[in-house]
Each structure stands twice: as structure tokens, then as C-alpha cells.
């Protein structure tokens, strides 16, 4: 009889919904802990003969769950929970975990650490930067470079970074924002990171790793801006696409290999610096820029929505992959593959998101043809309602992303109703051509 591992999964977004689905397909028994009554994850936990817990995620809850359930290993997903040390809480019970500890996740929750690590170990891909809590040093850097990206050092949910020429009008606004971040101790860390503004196109590389070995995943391009044509404020991500050859229309094989090499060198440097192996999923937000491949930031977990793109075409046993990471022996990449399909994922968000979202509004779902995953919603009396964050991710895969985009768009328009908004341009020929033409103007195509 095939072994049925018991897995504790902690987290409750659309990303965690598809992770739960893939673990369920791998014949795992799911013990799921969510901060709210997530309808999709709850259903999968019950179908797997496991258990579902909806509770505040803290050490008391973790202790109670592990006292009452036999767990082979655990996987903690969202960045906030990794920063909170949920992996560490689980490890206290001698349960193996396939996600990073709080100390390991520092590569995400402290951007100054990540930048200094790359610089110290001479890793290719680091932009010019300063990480400081001295306003004069920050202002001097802004005056020198003129065009900059101003970043809180800590976690911001994808919403704290501002760039001159986009969210910031000029140097003076950049200085004012840096001062505001310092005085408010935004994100809990009294350091601000300022980098030279890079011109190009961003892309996401995600890898499975046990700290020594890696399995890279297909590249994905996310769309952070709320509005069509990449306008408006930053969000947690409005949607993303991947291509059938697992690259992107503007990325070559050599670019992909260079990004992978940066990941490998960063993991080696991380071990040299901390004497710990980073374990879990390492996410590199990169840019093909006029100065080469640069790393915009690291994340210590799957992206959201990028996880939905790659896991929708994942071929293999996700439970086996994660368990091998937990045991410090990542399985051979020969056991993992990804279908040669393109994917397009689009998020439905409450009207008014992110500043004044339409909360507690019913979402009507009528026989979708494509896969969809619940993000920040709740169920009451058999009905689904919005909260203040992203609501539902809809994804399709096809022979190319134009075909996948049409399928997603048709499904959203015919199968979902409510006080909802989505970006209809993600994955369209018009938007992709605009990005390619921009790169041509920069002599990158």
C-alpha cells in the first residue's frame, strides 16, 4: 500500500489552496491551519481524511495541533508567518519542516541583510544601493543617483516600495518618503534601503532547495500594479503568466541560467554567513535591465500568484519533494517536471482594493470551466464573501499564453459575479508587445 504522509500545512491564501490541492493529489493526509474558515483548503483537508483548524496562528494553537495529531512534516507558507517564527514553533516539537526558520527567512524580511550578503560575497546581480538609518546618507545617495527605488527593509506585502518617476515625482519626494519610513519605523525595521532605479522588465524565478541542491521552476512574470497598462498603486499581485517553453518572451536560456547561478551562489553565501542551510522555496525577483540581470529582491517562499502558475503545470509528487527538503535530501530533479503549457492567472479583487475594498460582499460563482483558487474570502451559510484583500485567482493553461488568457478572461466574465475588479489586460498580446517594444527602446531586444 502506498504510504500516506501526514502533513501540517499552515497558511490560507490562493497560493496555499493550490499547495493543498497538489499535496492532496500526492495522497497526503492534510492537517491544515488557517487564520480564517477557508472554504477550499477546508474541503481538501476533509477529503484527505485529515483535519482543518481555523484559529489565530500562534504557538498555543501549534502546540495543541501537534499534541493531537501525528505529523510527518510541516510546510509554512506566507511570509508573515515565517517572520513570526511559525517554523520554529513547529520544530520545537521535533517535527521536520520544509520551510525556512525565522532566521533563514531573514533573506526576505530584512532587505538590508540580503543586499549586504550579495555585496560581501561579490555575487553578480546586486544593484548599487545603500542600507542605512542615517537620513543624510540616504539623501546623499538620492542626490547622487537621482532616479532611485526607496524600500522599507522589512515586509510590506508588495506595497511599500516606491520609485522615482512612478510613485515618486522627483528627488524631493524620494527624500520625503525615506524620512517618513525612518520616522515611522515602517515594517518594524529601522533601516531604509535605497537602490539605483533599474530600467527593464522584471521576472520571477522560484526554486525548491534544501540549501545545497536546487530544482528550478519555470519563469513567471507578475503584474503588481492595480490598473490596466501597468498603472496605479502596487498590490500583492493582480496576475501573472508563464510560457510553454518555461522562459519568457524577453528572456533567453542564458539569462535563465544566469539567474539560476545567482540563486546557487546566494545559497552558498547564506550558508557561509549563517552556518545554516536555507530550506524551502527561494524566490528571486529579477530584472532584465540595461545593466544586465539584477536581483530586485528575494522571497523565502512561493510567490502569490506565481505559485499558481508553476504548480498548475507541476508534474511529480509535491509531498515527496517537500518531505525530501525537510529531510535535507532534495530528491533528484529527474522526478520533477513541468508540462509544456503556457499559463495565465488573474486575480479577482473587491472593488476599491487596496485602499477602500468592498468587504463582506457576496461572490456568485456559476460553473467555472477553469481552475480557481480562493484567496482572502470566507464562507457563511454556504455563500462566499469578500474580505479586504484579494479574493479569487483564476488560471488556465494552453499551448500559448494568448490562448490561456482568452480562456481565463471568458471564465471570469461568465462565471464570477459580485463587487469585483480584475485586470483584463494580463497575458494579452497588446500588453506583451508593449513590454517588448519598451525593451527594444532600451536596446535589450
Image (cartoon, rainbow, N blue to C red):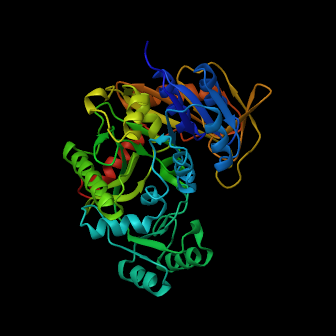
Q: Report if residue 137 is visible in the image.
A: yes
Residue 261 relative to residue 305: left or right: left
The spot of residue 91 in percent (x, y) is: 51, 47
- In the picture, residue 289 is in which quadrant? bottom left
Q: Nearer the viewer, residue 243 or 311?
A: 311
The spot of residue 316 in percent (x, y) is: 36, 25
- In the picture, residue 206 is in which quadrant? top left
Residue 372 relative to residue 254: left or right: right
* Residue 48 vertical placement versus 210 (above, below): above
The spot of residue 229 in percent (x, y) is: 48, 49
> Residue visible at 62% across and 18% down?
367
Q: Which of 167 and 123 is in front in this view?
A: 123
Give the farthest residue toward the right. Answer: 381
What is the number of callouts on the image? Answer: 0
* Residue 27 vertical placement versus 135 (above, below): above
Give the farthest residue toward the top. Answer: 1
> Residue visible at 66% across and 21% down?
366
Residue 199 relative to residue 136: left or right: left
* Residue 67 vertical placement versus 236 (above, below): above
Quadrant location of the N terminus in the rendered image = top left
Q: Which of 353 and 189 is in front in this view?
A: 189
Give the farthest residue toward the left. Answer: 254
Q: Report if residue 394 is visible in the image.
A: no
- In the picture, residue 336 is in which quadrant? top left
The spot of residue 373 in percent (x, y) is: 57, 31
Amino acid at each position: 500500500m502506498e504510504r500516506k504522509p501526514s502533513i501540517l500545512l499552515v497558511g490560507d491564501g490562493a497560493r496555499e489552496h493550490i499547495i493543498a490541492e497538489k499535496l492532496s493529489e500526492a495522497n497526503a493526509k492534510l492537517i491544515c491551519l488557517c487564520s480564517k474558515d477557508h472554504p477550499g483548503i477546508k474541503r481538501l483537508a476533509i477529503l484527505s481524511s485529515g483535519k482543518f483548524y481555523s484559529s489565530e496562528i500562534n504557538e498555543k494553537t501549534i502546540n495543541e495541533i501537534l499534541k493531537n495529531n501525528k505529523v510527518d512534516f510541516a510546510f509554512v507558507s506566507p511570509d508573515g508567518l515565517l517572520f513570526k517564527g511559525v517554523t520554529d514553533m513547529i520544530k520545537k516539537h521535533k517535527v521536520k519542516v520544509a520551510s525556512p526558520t525565522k532566521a533563514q527567512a531573514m533573506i526576505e524580511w530584512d532587505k538590508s541583510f540580503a543586499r549586504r550578503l550579495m555585496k560581501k560575497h561579490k555575487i553578480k546581480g546586486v544593484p548599487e544601493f545603500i542600507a542605512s538609518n542615517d537620513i543624510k546618507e540616504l539623501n546623499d545617495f538620492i542626490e547622487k543617483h537621482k532616479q532611485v527605488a526607496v524600500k522599507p527593509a522589512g515586509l510590506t506585502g508588495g506595497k511599500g516600495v516606491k520609485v522615482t518617476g512612478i510613485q515618486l515625482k522627483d528627488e524631493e519626494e524620494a527624500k520625503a518618503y525615506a524620512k517618513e519610513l525612518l520616522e515611522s519605523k515602517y515594517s518594524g525595521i529601522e533601516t531604509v534601503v535605497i537602490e539605483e532605479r533599474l530600467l527593464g522588465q522584471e521576472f520571477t524565478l522560484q526554486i525548491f532547495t534544501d540549501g545545497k541542491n536546487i530544482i528550478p521552476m519555470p519563469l513567471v512574470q507578475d503584474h503588481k500594479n492595480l490598473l490596466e497598462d501597468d498603472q496605479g498603486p502596487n498590490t500583492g499581485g493582480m496576475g501573472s503568466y508563464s510560457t510553454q517553453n518555461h522562459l519568457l518572451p524577453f528572456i533567453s536560456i542564458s539569462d535563465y541560467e544566469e539567474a539560476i547561478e545567482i540563486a546557487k551562489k546566494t545559497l552558498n553565501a547564506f550558508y557561509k554567513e549563517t552556518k545554516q542551510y536555507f530550506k524551502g522555496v527561494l524566490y528571486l525577483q529579477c530584472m532584465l535591465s540595461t545593466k544586465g540581470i539584477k536581483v530586485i529582491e528575494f522571497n523565502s517562499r512561493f510567490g502569490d500568484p506565481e505559485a499558481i502558475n508553476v504548480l498548475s503545470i507541476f508534474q511529480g509528487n509535491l509531498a515527496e519533494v517537500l518531505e525530501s527538503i525537510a529531510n535535507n535530501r532534495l530528491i533528484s530533479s529527474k522526478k520533477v517536471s513541468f508540462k509544456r503549457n503556457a499559463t495565465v492567472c488573474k486575480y479577482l479583487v473587491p472593488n476599491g482594493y487596496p485602499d477602500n475594498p468592498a468587504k463582506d460582499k457576496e461572490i456568485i460563482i456559476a460553473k467555472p470551466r477553469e481552475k480557481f483558487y480562493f484567496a482572502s474570502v470566507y464562507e457563511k451559510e454556504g455563500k462566499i464573501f469578500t474580505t479586504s484583500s484579494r479574493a479569487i485567482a483564476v488560471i488556465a493553461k494552453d499551448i500559448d499564453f494568448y490562448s490561456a488568457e482568452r480562456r481565463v478572461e471568458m471564465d471570469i466574465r461568465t462565471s464570477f459575479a459580485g463587487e469585483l475588479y480584475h485586470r483584463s489586460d494580463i497575458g494579452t498580446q497588446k500588453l506583451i508587445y508593449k513590454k517588448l517594444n519598451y525593451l527594444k527602446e532600451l536596446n535589450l531586444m
